[in-house]
Image (tube, rainbow, N blue to C red):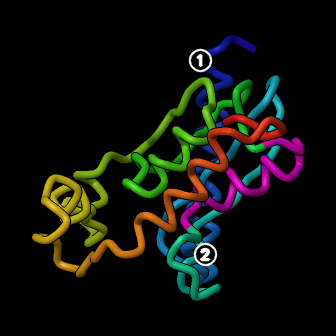
């Protein structure tokens, strides 16, 4: 199978997962798959409302499942196919998981058109902490930094 047809096949599966989640009222219309060496390692859809978990976006669901199956906290040899451009949370998780590529269907303008608008999060990230809509207050920094200092000198840590 040529590479473009393979990408299309996996993207269609992500779109099918989006429809499955939407039709089962599990959450929003978002689906994703993780592929390694031409095989689907994990597939899933948004489960935010069915699990009362605001982090249960399709990408988060499949990243968690794929990492468990591969017994790794990184997806370096994997490709993620997602039915929509990832939100800021999922984008962060994708970068931490380090897949080699991400393919997406709809973009953030398409998501905004159906009331899934993440622009307010991007706007919040550009603000100083004291100007954000949710109050963020720093405290006990010296005590917290002690743990960071211990991490920095720890010899048996697993780097990521």
Q: Residues within 10 Å of mark 2 (few under 14, many from 20)?
A: many
Q: Nearer the viewer, mark 2 or mark 1?
A: 2
Count of numbered tags:
2
Label 1 SS: helix
Residue 20 rendering spot, x and y as whole percentages: 64, 68
- Depth check, front residue: 124 or 84: 124
The C terminus - image quarter:
top right
**How far apart, in angstroms, are the residues tagged by discs 2 and 1?**
29 Å
Residue 17 rendering spot, x and y as whole percentages: 64, 59
Label 2 SS: loop
Q: Is residue 137 above or below residue 108?
A: below
- Depth check, front residue: 42 or 154: 154
Q: Is residue 114 left or right of residue 97?
A: left
Residue at 64% x, 85% y is: 51
Q: Is residue 137 left or right of residue 1?
A: left
Specify the label residue 47 is tagged with. 2
The N terminus - image quarter:
top right
Looking at the rendering, the stretch of residues picked out in magenta corresponds to 57-72
Q: Is residue 14 left or right of residue 89?
A: right
Per the picture, the main secondary structure of the magenta-coloured stretch is helix
Specify the label residue 4 is tagged with. 1
């Amino acid at each position: 199978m040529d590479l473009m047809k393979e990408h299309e096949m996996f993207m269609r599966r992500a779109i099918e997962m989006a429809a499955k989640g939407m039709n089962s009222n599990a959450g929003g219309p978002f689906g994703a798959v993780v592929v390694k060496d031409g095989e689907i390692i994990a597939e899933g859809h948004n489960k935010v409302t069915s699990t009362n978990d605001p982090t249960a976006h399709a990408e988060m669901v499949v990243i968690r499942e794929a990492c468990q199956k591969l017994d790794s906290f990184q997806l370096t040899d994997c490709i993620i196919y997602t039915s929509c451009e990832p939100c800021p949370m999922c984008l962060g998780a994708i970068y931490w998981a380090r897949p080699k590529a991400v393919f997406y269907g709809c973009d953030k303008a398409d998501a905004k058109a159906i009331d899934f608008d993440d622009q307010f999060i991007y706007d919040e990230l550009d603000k100083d902490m004291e100007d954000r809509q949710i109050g963020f207050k720093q405290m006990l920094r010296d005590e917290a930094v002690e743990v960071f200092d211990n991490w920095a000198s720890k010899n048996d840590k697993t780097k990521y």
